[in-house]
Image (cartoon, coloured by chain):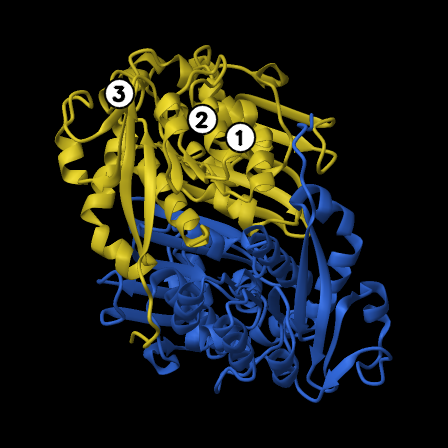
Chain colours: A blue, B yellow
């Protein structure tokens, strides 16, 4: 039964910076779910600015038809739009209600994503992002800038894709004093170790992950733990308020995991898992943080022991709550897109009219 | 490392309606964490209105000292405050930034909590509540009223206390199409069934729960499933957008659970659990919802099978995410208070200056 309250649909104009897998999934989801978003969330999202690395930034204040955007082979030579050679130039020159930043900026400096986010937040424009390294490297600063400007900053899809980890830990446990967390934060690594536990060699398991589109041709980010390090740094910054530098996180790869270690673990009923750990002895300072990502023997009564394949998990400890466990899918382009969509809806609900 | 961004602490004036266990825990937490809230969340909460059922509503626009409020044996005869015989009269006559509604209104009509929440939301004032039945009975309407008025409405502590279930499902999975959920939503019932699985008789297990302060002297709300029904209705309303009536939820108590059923379950490696289930065949309508709370055999490979004692859990299914599981404590006055605190922080972050 619907009540008789009048709701007027709120227009939300977005800059969509990044038009790869996640950006395209989002555009498709916004297009095919337009009616659902209007009915359920009372919002109507239009893309006014669109950028990719190759063609730069195009802008149309009236909003572009999403279907036709998805059909474009290039952003160049579009009639009736203004165009800049780079996203940052376009952002500086135009207006929107939300920046959706879904490029993938490298671990060296998180650029150009970091600059895009700063540009929006400085102007009080909310930011939604799936771009891990800018948040990993500058999360505390970005969150403080957002607070200072009264703009939302959300990055749900950067940790465990669309599984709602950051919403739960940042909003849902706000005010609790965090003590630490343990997690399986990389889908590919967990998939490989799960297959090895079934008796398969590392190389076979990796090849299967690559065939399934899980691991890149160069699987270093996943199997060497860099991706899990980024996620741990994001959790530290956004859920604990403590900025870590990359070199502060101890990192050991699963590439050297010996068959014998896996077998030995199994023989004692334990499991070998690539575990990401944060320990805090002080709530709001980075002074007493220890952080590591490494293969670890996990006892069978540990909630992480039974998390298999591409499923990921995080066990968060805080006072006065105790332990909260969140388990869900850890990867997939449509899942990262879903995380971005959920952030966009959450932001749209709270933007000023 | 703190960045150099200037943050000015935002004052948040609250009406605190309900000054029992949860209200007092919250007042204490706000008092003892004032500095932490200012540093980490950049807010300063003051209680301008305070009500209980016995003494009515008192108001002091300057805000009352929390420590002295906690020492009061009665709200009557306070110097320097205005006073009304009931909360609703005081709410109508005064102003605040957020209503914190922590009374416990009965399942018959959810009053007076429902009226309190409507009064605030109609005026565009955000509401945070731990009061189950008003949300169970009127959740869709309250959420729509909140949206129409641009005011936040949060009820994290109504489901699994401070465990961040609603944040995750409402905000974190916004835009996903819900398919259903299963959960263990009552701490006392799960505690009793866990003890029975260890071989203890029902009466012993109940008595232990009562000694531990888990179950009331009249344990009907817990063991007969009414409390779990309320939580299921809240999840349906706020996470699925579908309002259920109480009589639409099939309910079977655990009071009649025979020793032999528990033993038989154990002998097959399964567990007997008091499972709350919602099934949706349509995303946004209440037409095809089925909802039930009943003792159920749960196989050992089911994530709910290993959730023991006062720990609760919910397994949520949605497209395109698949399955998300959240496990955490299900009861405790300080945990309900923590849930209210997290909502209050989330609301304060997004209220207009």
Mark-to-mark CA distance, 1 and 2: 8 Å
| Residue indicated by mark 3 | B208
In this orientation, does residue A269 appear? no
Please report the residue visible at 59 percent of the width from the left and 49 percent of the height from the top.
B173
In this orientation, does residue A327 appear? yes
Please report the residue visible at 16 percent of the width from the left and 26 percent of the height from the top.
B78
**Res. B234 mark:** 1
Q: Sequence order check: which comes first, mark 3 or mark 1?
A: 3
Q: Sequence order check: which comes first, mark 3 or mark 2?
A: 2
For disc 1, the chain is B
Task: Nearest to the eye among marks 3 and 1: give it.
Answer: 1
| Observer-nearest of A246 and A225 | A246
- Asked if both marks, 1 and 2, belong to the same chain, the answer given is yes
Please report the residue visible at 40 percent of the width from the left and 71 percent of the height from the top.
A293
For disc 2, the chain is B
Where disc 3 sits, the SS reads helix
């Amino acid at each position: 039964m619907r009540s008789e309250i009048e709701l007027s649909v709120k227009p939300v104009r977005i800059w969509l910076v990044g038009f790869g897998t996640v950006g395209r999934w989002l555009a498709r989801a916004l297009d095919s779910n337009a009616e659902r978003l209007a009915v359920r969330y009372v919002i109507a999202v239009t893309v006014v600015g669109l950028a990719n690395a190759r063609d730069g930034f195009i802008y149309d204040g009236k909003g572009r038809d999403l279907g036709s955007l998805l059909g474009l082979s290039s952003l160049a030579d579009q009639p009736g739009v203004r165009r800049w050679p780079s996203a940052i130039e376009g952002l500086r020159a135009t207006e929107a209600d939300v920046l959706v930043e879904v490029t993938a900026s490298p671990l060296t400096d998180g650029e150009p994503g970091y600059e895009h986010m700063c540009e929006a937040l400085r102007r009080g424009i909310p930011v939604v992002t799936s771009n891990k390294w800018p948040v990993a490297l500058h999360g505390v600063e970005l969150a403080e800038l957002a607070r200072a400007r009264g703009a939302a900053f959300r990055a749900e899809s950067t940790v465990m894709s669309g599984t709602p980890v950051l919403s739960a830990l940042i909003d849902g446990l706000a005010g609790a004093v965090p003590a630490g967390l343990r997690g399986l934060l990389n889908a590919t690594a967990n998939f490989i170790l799960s297959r090895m536990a079934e008796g398969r060699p590392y190389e076979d398991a990796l090849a299967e992950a690559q065939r399934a589109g899980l691991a890149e041709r160069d699987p270093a980010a996943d199997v060497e733990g860099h991706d899990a390090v980024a996620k741990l740094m994001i959790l530290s910054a956004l859920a604990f308020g403590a900025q870590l530098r990359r070199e502060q996180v101890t990192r050991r790869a699963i590439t050297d995991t010996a068959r014998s270690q896996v077998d030995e673990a199994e023989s004692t009923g334990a499991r070998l898992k690539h575990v990401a750990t944060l320990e805090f002895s002080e709530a709001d300072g980075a002074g007493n943080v220890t952080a590591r990502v490494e293969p670890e023997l996990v006892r069978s009564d540990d909630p992480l022991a039974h998390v298999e394949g591409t499923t990921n998990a995080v066990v968060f400890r805080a006072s006065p709550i105790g332990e909260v466990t969140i388990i869900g899918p850890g990867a997939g382009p449509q899942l990262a897109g879903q995380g971005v969509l959920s952030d966009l809806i959450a932001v749209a609900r709270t933007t000023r009219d």
